[in-house]
Image: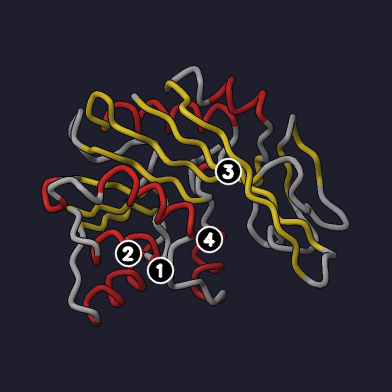
Amino acid sequence: MESWDPIWDNVFANQEWGKYPSESLIQFIARNYYKANRPRVKILEVGCGTGANIWFISREGFDTYGIDASKVAIDIAVSRLQREGLSASLSIGDISILPYEDNFFDAVIDNQCLYTNNQENTRRILQEIRRVLKPQGKLYSRTFSDKMYLGKTYDEIGLLEFNNVSDGPLSGKGFIRLSNKASIHDIYGSVFTIESIDSLDYTSHNEQIHISDYVILAVK
């Protein structure tokens, strides 16, 4: 299984995406790096998409990097940064083979990217993330939990792994891997020291759809 599904080019081209980061991502950056010498703090987002987080991190004065396999997404991100006079080093590439030196970044962000990979690929990606992080570097990972609304119909193809979701937020996104605390400790804990696991839950469509995420903070 490849670490990126070409279906995402179509998703990025046809779906309107949010332009601003989540509160939990802002909190992570603020609590860990606001008092640092920001231009010297290197932050990478894997699967940066159309650049909502990249826009924020660059705007806050950090040395900003992003990588995504979708040229469509990167083009949108570059265009926004240019319009707003911001800069970041953005690359089109495979997050399972990161084009960066060892021990390069102070932090790496995964905002609902790794969940599109099966367990084997996720472990390989986490090893790459660990490689490019500095000693004591931090990982922020937001991923869908097993309480997430999957859809009226779907194909279960493995433990917490699904495809062909019929409706809801995960419809049309291809392969889906959900997480529970046991799988987080198994997958993330084999590569990083986990500092915290917190849940974010809310509903939409008059409480008909349950959105559920885990926010995982870990350190090399």
Camera-nearest residue between 186 and 206: 206
- Mark found first going from the N terminus, 1 or 4: 4
The answer to whether residue 81 is above or below residue 26 is below
Q: Are the residues at dot 2 and dot 1 in contact (C-beta closer than 8 Å)? A: no
Q: Which quadrant of the structure image shows residue 208?
A: bottom right
How far apart are the two marked residues, 1 and 3, measured between alpha carbons?
Answer: 20 Å
Q: Amino acid at mark 2?
A: Phe
- Name the residue at 30% across, 39% down: 98
Left or right: residue 2 compared with residue 179: left
Q: Amino acid at mark 4?
A: Trp
How far apart are the two marked residues, 2 and 1, measured between alpha carbons?
Answer: 20 Å
How far apart are the two marked residues, 2 and 3, measured between alpha carbons?
Answer: 23 Å
- Name the residue at 51% across, 36% down: 216
Q: Which mark is residue 72?
A: 1
Considering the numbered disc 2 on the image, is that residue within a helix, a strand or a loop? Answer: helix
How far apart are the two marked residues, 3 and 4, measured between alpha carbons?
Answer: 13 Å
